[in-house]
Image (cartoon, rainbow, N blue to C red):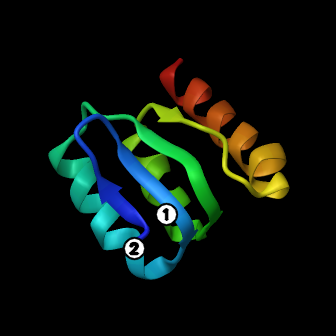
Amino acid sequence: MTVTLQDDAITLTGACGVEEVENLVGYLERRQDLPVDLAGATSIHTALWQALMVFKPVVTGTPASSFTSGQVLPAFRAYLEESQE
């Protein structure tokens, strides 16, 4: 499993594929108080990004992929800021 529930965060590690979206959604539904840590992720399927966009959790960590950390994550954070206004 690449999406896991820890005591202090929902953690994404390795290559997070579409098959993990149900786990992520379940964790986000049950533990809305926890941040989502992306530091261990090497790739994140768009379905997981969509779930994050719906639930709008606090996101910590920077994924290993330069594209994800340089392009996707900044756009995601801008979306979160925009939706809070």
Percent across and percent down for residue 79 are 62, 36
Residue at the spot of label 1: 48
Q: Position of residue 65 (x, y in %)?
A: 77, 58
The residue that appears at 53% across and 17% down in the rendered structure is 85
- Residues under numbered marks 2 and 1 in contact, where contact means CB atoms less than 8 Å apart: yes
70 relative position to 53: left or right: right
| Precedes in sequence: disc 2 or disc 1 | 2
* Amino acid carrying mark 2 in the image: Glu
The quadrant in which residue 27 appears is bottom left
SS category of the residue bearing label 2: helix
Which residue is at 56% across, 67% downward?
Answer: 14
Tell us which disc is closer to us: 2 or 1: 2
Q: Residues within 10 Å of mark 2 (few under 14, many from 20)?
A: some
Marker disc for residue 27: none
Instruction: Name above or below for residue 47 compared with residue 49.
Output: below
Give the image location of residue 20, x and y in percent.
Answer: 39, 73
Q: Farthest residue in the left direction? A: 30
Q: Which residue is mark 2?
A: 20
Depth order, front residue of 21/39:
39
| Residue 7: % across, % down | 22, 39
Tell whether 49 sits left or right of 29.
Answer: right
Q: Quadrant of the N terminus?
A: bottom left
Q: Secondary structure at mark 1?
A: helix
Q: Residue furthest bottom?
A: 19
Between the C-alphas of marks 2 and 1, the distance is 8 Å
Q: Type of residue at label 1? A: Leu
